[in-house]
Amino acid sequence: MARIAEITRKTAETDITAKINLDGEGRSVISTGIPFMDHMLTLFAKHGFFDLEVSAKGDLEVDCHHTMEDLGIVLGELLARAAGDKAGIRRYGNFLLPMDETLVMIALDLSGRGGLYYDVTPPAARLNNIDTRLFHEFFQAFAVKSGLNLHIRMIASAETHHLFEAIFKGVAKALDQALGSDGRIKGVLSTKGSL
């Protein structure tokens, strides 16, 4: 069964349409109005082998907050829908990702109980026009809406661009691992019988 989902979310602050195929080839068409997020979501798709399309228009004249948070909401809902009942998947994923001087650890569980555990101190407070605290808002919304227990830990970094690039790549790699199938798993990987 195809693990594909599409969502449109329209509010007074943002208008976002997104589509994902969890069993893709890493192709993407991304337009968020925030060039750095376009870059992050493009590499997220590439390193997770997800086919991802995102079109977002937000009130960027105010700031990036509403767009960043709503992107997290939409992508979280998208992941939850595409993953379906999660039968046969590994459920857990982790990745230790180096990028030059940067090292991040990602660990996650597609448990259905969304929560973000974020230990990241960016080297700079701003990245182009983005307040770097907004990445916490993005991943918080993403984790809650997808039902993902997500740990993001910065081990070392001296360069803000590399830090967030490593985080997005690491989350993609850990998700690819968790969403992978294992023929030994009958139903879902839980003694409760559901996730």
Image (cartoon, grey):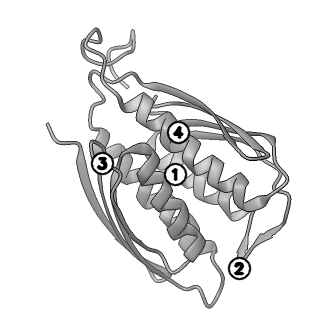
Q: Secondary structure at mark 4?
A: loop
Residue 87 x, y percent position in the rendering: 26, 24
Query: In the rendered view, would you say 77 is above or below 70?
Result: above
Q: Nearer the viewer, residue 73 or 171?
A: 171
Q: Secondary structure at mark 3?
A: loop
Disc 3 or disc 4, which is closer to the eye? Answer: 3
Label 1 – label 2 distance at C-alpha: 21 Å
Q: In the rendered image, which quarter contains the N terminus?
A: top left
Query: In the rendered view, would you say 123 is above or below 32?
Result: above
Labels 1 & 2 near each other (Cβ < 8 A)? no
The type of residue carrying mark 4 is Gly
As drawn, the residue found furthest toward the front would be 100
Q: Is residue 154 toward the left or the right of residue 193 in the image?
A: right
- Which is more N-terminal, label 2 or label 1? 2
- Which is more N-terminal, label 4 or label 3? 3
- Per the rendering, the mark at residue 142 is 1
- Which is more N-terminal, label 4 or label 2? 4
